[in-house]
Image (tube, grey):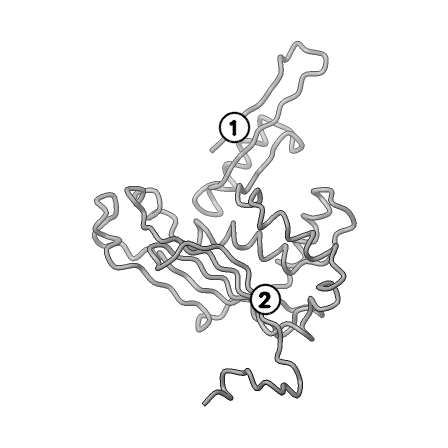
């Protein structure tokens, strides 16, 4: 989706902004082709590639929670956190949009954009400022620190009835559910799994970030699951 905002080219203070909302192409090749075509027509500072999920209140509050909170700031690391789950659930299916969805699947439709953006905000280091380029730089550092994903730490599925949608091919194997474990190889997060989950036609509609802290040493309440009888 491309939206263009511009003032009259004859105006002394005229400006042009091109806003491109995801999906930005269907794959790497089509995304690079689109970037190349836009680059022939506009300067880079006139282009805005946006993810509308970043406009949600939950996501916008992440930076405040992490970097303006003396309670969580010293705890946000491998010494205190056992795992982090970033979950996106929908309680409805494709609802006639199967023709679009089947070209992408749940990974490209949700995980590699929406959930990776949230993952970066949860895992990145404190940026120099709130300027977009400083936040972007810290996000890139996190992504560069992610180890290759292991096959055994990926779960894919397709909900029953997906192919009943007349816009979906009868032989489709496009996943409508995915669970992926990311492992960040850096000083802060070494050994902490980040579990990204997304799916359609599940039993609830929810978007959440679940930070599971480690058990308290010498827990007098014996609240670990394994200790219950």
Q: Which residue is drawn at 29% across and 44% down?
A: 95
Q: Where is residue 167 in the image (x, y as percent from the top left)?
A: 25, 43
Q: Which residue is drawn at 55% across and 35% down?
A: 36
Q: Position of residue 13 (x, y in %)?
A: 71, 16
Instruction: Indicate left or right for 44 with 149 as reference.
Output: right
Q: Is mark 1 on a helix, strand or loop?
A: strand
Position above or below: 67 against 130: below
Badge 2: few (under 14), some or many (20 or more) residues near its Cα, within 10 Å? some
Q: Which of marks 2 and 1 is in front?
A: 2
Position above or below: 18 against 164: above
Q: Which of 197/156 is in front? A: 197
Name which quarter of the figure residue 216 lies in.
Answer: bottom right
* Residue beneath disc 1: 3
Among the two numbered marks 2 and 1 on one chain, the one whose residue lies closer to the N terminus: 1
Instruction: Indicate left or right for 11 with 115 as reference.
Output: right
* Residue beneath disc 2: 211
Total marks in image: 2
């Amino acid at each position: 989706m491309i939206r263009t905002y511009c003032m009259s080219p004859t105006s002394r203070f005229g400006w042009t902004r091109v806003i491109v909302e995801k999906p930005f192409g269907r794959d790497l090749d089509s995304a690079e082709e689109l970037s190349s075509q836009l680059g022939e027509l506009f300067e880079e500072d006139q282009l805005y590639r946006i993810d509308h999920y970043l406009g949600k209140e939950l996501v916008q509050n992440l930076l405040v929670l992490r970097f303006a909170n003396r309670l969580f700031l010293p705890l946000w690391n491998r010494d205190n956190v056992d795992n982090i789950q970033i979950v996106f659930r929908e309680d409805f299916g494709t609802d006639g949009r199967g023709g679009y969805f089947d070209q992408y699947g749940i990974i490209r439709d949700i995980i590699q954009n929406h959930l990776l953006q949230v993952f970066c905000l949860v895992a990145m280091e404190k940026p120099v400022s709130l300027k977009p380029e400083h936040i972007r730089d810290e996000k890139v550092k996190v992504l560069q620190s992610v180890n290759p994903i292991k096959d055994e730490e990926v779960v894919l599925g397709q909900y029953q009835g997906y192919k009943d949608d007349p816009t979906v091919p009868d032989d489709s194997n496009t996943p409508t559910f995915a669970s992926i474990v990311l492992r960040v190889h850096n000083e802060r997060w070494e050994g902490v799994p980040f579990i990204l989950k997304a799916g359609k036609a599940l039993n609830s509609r929810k978007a959440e970030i679940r930070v599971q802290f480690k058990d308290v040493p010498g827990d007098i309440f014996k609240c670990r699951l394994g200790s219950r009888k």
